[in-house]
Image (cartoon, rainbow, N blue to C red):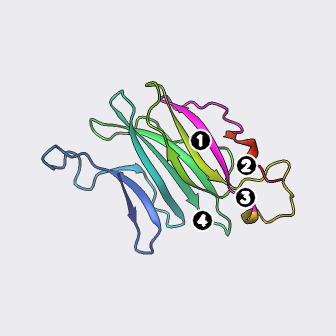
Amino acid sequence: LRRETSFGGSHCRLMLQKLSMSGELLWDAEGVRVYPNDDSDIILGYENISDDGEGNIAVFFMKNDKTTDEDRVSNLFTKVSKENGSPVFETPVVLSPSNDNRANMKVSQLVNGEYWITMWEDKRMLAGDNPDVDPTELPSRLYMQRIYKDGSLDNEENNITKPQNKKV
């Protein structure tokens, strides 16, 4: 998996390439696009890949739509076939409902052959937060999400956070 950048420096697209044990390219010389994006205002990062145990490659990444002055970050998950790199899902699965500032996504190995656990830092506004505070001044809270191989999620609406991370 590699992240290609445009001339202006934005991270534009994610590409995969399959290699033989001797280093021969097995897919197109350019590789296969995991996420077709040519918009220089959209930054992709924190990418991670994993075997799904069913002949596919699971790809997790974060997308920041910088078309406004604020960060609008989404956590995404998709799968491609190991055989030819074709997409398994029509569109990536969005792991988290908010579009706030977030970073540092980590992904576990496949657990019990069934699901992965993702974790990231998030600055979303919670009910107990002071609404007059600039969101960039909020503390980073750790959120987690379980995602099954078919793309379904646990606790889809709120994700999971540790209460002790909440600002008081």
Task: Give the residue type that dot 4 points to.
Answer: Lys
Q: Nearer the viewer, residue 81 or 128?
A: 128
- Mark 4 or mark 1, which is nearer the start of the sequence? 4
Task: Give the residue type that dot 2 points to.
Answer: Asn
CA–CA distance in space, label 2 to label 3: 8 Å
The mark found on residue 95 in the picture is: 1
Q: Circle 3 sits on which residue? A: 139
Q: Circle 4 sits in a helix, a strand or a loop, which is it? A: loop
**To which quarter of the image does residue 72 belong?**
bottom right
Q: Circle 1 sits in a helix, a strand or a loop, which is it? A: loop
Q: Position of residue 58 (x, y in %)?
A: 42, 39
Q: Nearer the viewer, residue 145 or 5?
A: 145
Q: Position of residue 36 (x, y in %)?
A: 43, 53
Q: Circle 3 sits in a helix, a strand or a loop, which is it? A: loop
Identify whether 145 is placed above or below 114.
below
Identify whether 147 is placed above or below 30.
above
Q: Circle 2 sits in a helix, a strand or a loop, which is it? A: helix
Indicate left or right for 135 with 48 as reference: right
What residue is shown at x 32% (from left), y 30% (from top)?
A: 55
Q: Circle 4 sits on which residue? A: 66
Q: Circle 2 sits on which residue? A: 165
User: Comparing marks 1 and 4, which lies closer to the viewer?
Assistant: 1
User: Comparing marks 1 and 2, which lies closer to the viewer?
Assistant: 2
CA–CA distance in space, label 1 to label 4: 19 Å
Instruction: Point out the stretch of residues depicted in magenta.
Output: 138-158
- Mark 4 or mark 3, which is nearer the start of the sequence? 4
Q: Position of residue 19 (x, y in %)?
A: 21, 46
Picture mark count? 4
- Mark 4 or mark 2, which is nearer the start of the sequence? 4
Pick out the residue farthest to the left. Answer: 22
